[in-house]
Amino acid sequence: MTGLLTGRTALVTGSSRGIGRAIAQRLAAEGAVVAVTARNYEPSPSTRAGQAEVLPGTIGETIALIEAAGGQAFGLAADLEDPEQRAGLIDRVVERTGRLDILVNNAGYADYSMVEDMPLETFDRTVEHYIRTPFVLTQKAIPHMRRLGAGWIVNIGSVTGLAPVRPYREYNKTSGDVIYASMKAALHRFTQGVAAELLKDNIAVNAVGPSTAVRTPGAASLIPDTFPTEPVEYLAETVLAMCHRPAAERTGLVAFSLHYPWSQGLTVHSLDGREVLPPLEPPATANPNILPAGL
């Protein structure tokens, strides 16, 4: 652990489990005080395909993992589909710590369906999570980061946001991920555009997504058994790499979690920062549209 983020405050949305939890742990291991957020303090049902499912993971569990490793974190429950709670989240973090240096827009919603069969409610919720919420939180964060003279915004993207390989794989024909993927593609473009707008303010805006997929509690049922997956540590390390350099040096990237560390010679650590993990080459089956150093 280098204390790279000592003195900084980070907000990681959707950090009660999965990718968000891993990112929160990694940033805290480098000294950031992390605001851990989810809809509720206790597990709450997530509705998909008309079925309610309670997924494992709580705000308190993430905080406990961070504190056990020597880090600092606090919890804030916020339903990001509620306009008032969403609009007030950034101010709640600043009221608690006096600052906001890092925003990671990770929270999401995925309910795959073929376009012909998708309910409009599912379409609207997907747009809400991946376009409206990052827009609102980014907009609210900018004045606080500008006041500090620097800031880092990381949006969690997806390889599905890239054009599918042709001839089309069976997954693209049958997975029902088109709307989810379309919103991730829009999030990539949002990232690149806002990066240009905020360069003058030394606020870096980047996107990071898995090179393949990460089998988290929320995503496991959507990932076929044959689909390649990867350890979450490589994604968390790539996010960390986007959270400390001046904007003039690193902004506007859409980077992928196996390709970026491999191409840049980035050392990948365990989530507590105490162990070095082996370099992991991107698989040959990865989408060939990925640029190793980022789009």
Image (cartoon, rainbow, N blue to C red):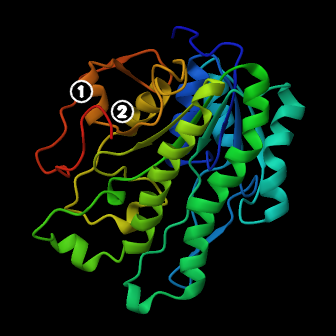
The circle on residue 234 is 2
Q: Position of residue 147 (x, y in %)?
A: 79, 24
Label 1 element class: helix
What amino acid type is highlighted by mark number 2? Answer: Tyr
Mark 1 residue crowding within 10 angstroms, few (<14) / some (14–19) / many (20+) = some
Residue 241 as seen in the image, left or right of residue 15 = left
Q: What secondary structure is marked by label 2?
A: helix
Which residue: 85% across, 60% down?
84
Q: Nearer the viewer, residue 163 or 268?
A: 163
Residue 16 position (above or below residue 238): below
Which residue occupies the foreground of this view, 174 or 68?
174
Q: Residue at x 39, y 65 (%)?
A: 181
* Image spot of residue 46 (x, y percent): 61, 70
In the rendered image, the residue lying farthest to the top is 2
Q: CA distance from mark 1 to mark 2?
A: 10 Å
Say which quarter of the image contains residue 256: top left
The x, y position of residue 237, in whole percent, is 42, 28
Q: Does label 1 or label 2 sit earlier along the sequence?
A: 2
Q: Nearer the viewer, mark 1 or mark 2?
A: 1
| Residue to which mark 1 is pinned | 262
Numbered circle sitting on residue 292 = none
Asked if 173 appears above or below 211 in the picture, the reply is below
Quarter in which the C terminus is drawn = top left
Q: Quadrant of residue 179?
A: bottom left
Instruction: Tell me the amino acid under the disc marked 1.
Output: Trp
Horizontal arrangement in the rendering, residue 128 relative to residue 273 (left or right): right
- Number of marks in the image? 2
Q: Nearer the viewer, residue 59 or 227?
A: 227
